[in-house]
Amino acid sequence: MASHLLDIEHLSTYFYTEEGTVKAVDDVSLQVRKGETVCIVGESGCGKSITAMSVMGLIQGPSGKVVSGKIDLEGTDLLKLNRNERRVIRGKEIGMIFQEPMSSLNPVLTIGQQIMEPLIEHLRMSKKEARKRAIELIEQVGISRAEQIANSYPHELSGGMLQRIMIAIAISCEPKLLIADEPTTALDVTIQAQILDILRNFREETGMSILLITHDLGVVAEMADYVIVMYSGKVVEEGEVTELFANPRHPYTQGLLKAKPILNQRQDELYSIPGQVPNPLDLTESCYFHDRCEHCLEICKVQAPELQELGTEQKVACWLYEKEATARV
Ligand SMILES: Nc1ncnc2c1ncn2[C@@H]1O[C@H](COP(=O)(O)OP(=O)(O)OP(=O)(O)O)[C@@H](O)[C@H]1O
């Protein structure tokens, strides 16, 4: 079995607001193996982005804080590094692509300058070398007229092109891990497929790992080896993609899969999970999904279930499987 590149253990990240404490990420553990794509899925507000921002060291204090846990990248606990060491890891070992490329690019620098920056800083390239590599990277992400694009400013490019440029920047130093937070959400489906192709090809060529955050199960089906389902800051189910899609155990995962449109099949009404994600300031000791769950038991209303292993590599936090889980121990 391939070894872990990223090992997150019991991570908790909170926001201390005037209204109370938001446990955005609450005791989350997850692993990403070398060369593997792990997808984190869940509805808006489940803690997917804050998990990624915690790995990147981008949680904004003083209100936001990683309160406990370990984020281990190939033996280095990132939470023990100082700001400068973290910045080096961020550009060189871990690349990140955000949902909105426009807000991550600098409007007054050319595309070429922005791709050159990490090459000069982290790989110590000369300006000339960095410029040459920047042009190659622009070509590598499928943009023609690379020279001309390098001299353009962000506002001159389309959303799909900007997202490709973000990928070029993120992969420029050949990171071991690429974190992509909803990288295709703002794009139309054709461009979305092209962007996913670029990521997949690059993964195959370099053997990097990808941590991909999405609410789109179509993207998960295309990209993931392993899936983590989050709900209200917690992992509620996880497993190999084929196993999880074939046999989803948690009622939340089942609902997400039911809500996914099926290709070539006309559905008169798309299913959506009834109710909403609970207010993070109003969480009790219950299973957070209980009031949206068709299978709610009495215990679900008073006690949250632990994440338990079920069979090969699937884990679920749900009282419905308690007997099955203990029987296997
Ligand atoms: N700066 C902040 N201050 C207070 N609460 C925050 C802050 N940032 C995020 N949160 C809260 O943390 C929780 C998790 O947010 P997160 O952005 O990780 O969700 P998400 O699953 O990525 O959703 P989305 O798909 O909408 O980005 C949410 O309840 C959110 O309101």
Image (cartoon, rainbow, N blue to C red):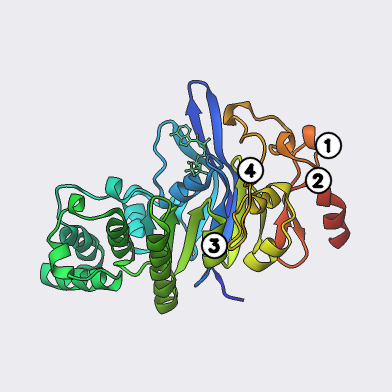
Element on which disc 2 rests: helix
* Label 2 residue near ligand 1, CB within 8 Å: no
Mark 4 nearby-residue class (10 Å; few <14, some 14–19, many ≥20): few
Residue denoted by label 1: 299
CB within 8 Å, label 1 to label 2: yes
Q: Amino acid at mark 3?
A: Val
Element on which disc 1 rests: helix
Q: Amino acid at mark 1?
A: Ile
Question: Which one is nearer the viewer's eye here, 150 or 272?
Answer: 272
**Disc 1/disc 2 C-alpha distance (Å):** 8 Å
**Mark earlier in primary sequence (2, 3):** 3
* Label 3 residue near ligand 1, CB within 8 Å: no
Q: Amino acid at mark 2?
A: Trp
Q: Which mark is residue 319?
A: 2
Residue 91 in view here: yes
**Disc 4/disc 2 C-alpha distance (Å):** 23 Å
**Disc 1/disc 3 C-alpha distance (Å):** 31 Å
- Give how far across and how far down residue 57 sits, in percent: 41, 48
**Mark earlier in primary sequence (4, 3):** 3
Q: Quadrant of residue 326?
A: bottom right
Question: Which quarter of the image is occupied by the C terminus?
Answer: bottom right
Residue denoted by label 3: 38
